Image: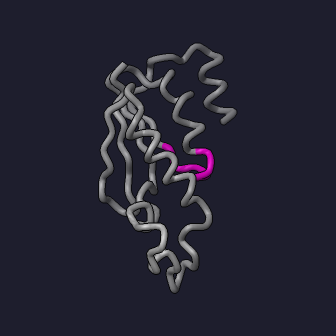
Amino acid sequence: MPFLNDLLAKGKVGCFEFTVVDADKDNYINYHEPLLKPVKVGGVIAFDNTLWFGSVALAEDDEKFNDPIMGPIKQNGYDAIKKLNIFLANDPRIESTLLLIGDGVTVCRRKY
């Protein structure tokens, strides 16, 4: 997050209309808070891969968690994406929707 920290240090607050997060999934939730500052009210933060192969909608005991090609879907980001989705759904500062494009894109509009 050095680039984001540099922007904030330079006073870049409320000047962006759109940002995209497609980084290491384990830190997605850590990007949300600092991104609210440079994104103006009414601006958008988009998080990529928030369906995580559809696994975030499966029951914990679903056999589909073991994909024949990808291996165990619950590994490598599943917990982080699930936690992010729950967090975003409950953050009163944003309105969010999950777009069923590719592996899912969550679009968040900053309300205040």
Rendered view: 94 above or below 87: above
Q: Quadrant of residue 75?
A: bottom right
Q: Residue furthest front?
A: 61
Q: Nearer the viewer, residue 24 or 68?
A: 68
Q: Nearer the viewer, residue 60 or 7?
A: 60
Q: Nearer the viewer, residue 36 or 9?
A: 36
Rendered view: 46 above or below 4: below
Q: Residue furthest top?
A: 11
Residue at the (45%, 52%) spot, across then down: 48
Residue at the (69%, 33%) spot, across then down: 2
- Magenta residues (range): 21-27
| Residue 82, position as x, y percentages in the image | 49, 53
Q: Quadrant of residue 70?
A: bottom right
Residue at the (62%, 16%) spot, across then down: 10
Q: Residue furthest bottom?
A: 68
Q: Is residue 1 magenta?
A: no
| Residue 3, position as x, y percentages in the image | 64, 32
- Residue 43 shown left or right of residue 30 in the figure: left
Residue at the (56%, 44%) spot, across then down: 28
Quarter of the picture holding the N terminus? top right
Q: Is residue 23 magenta?
A: yes
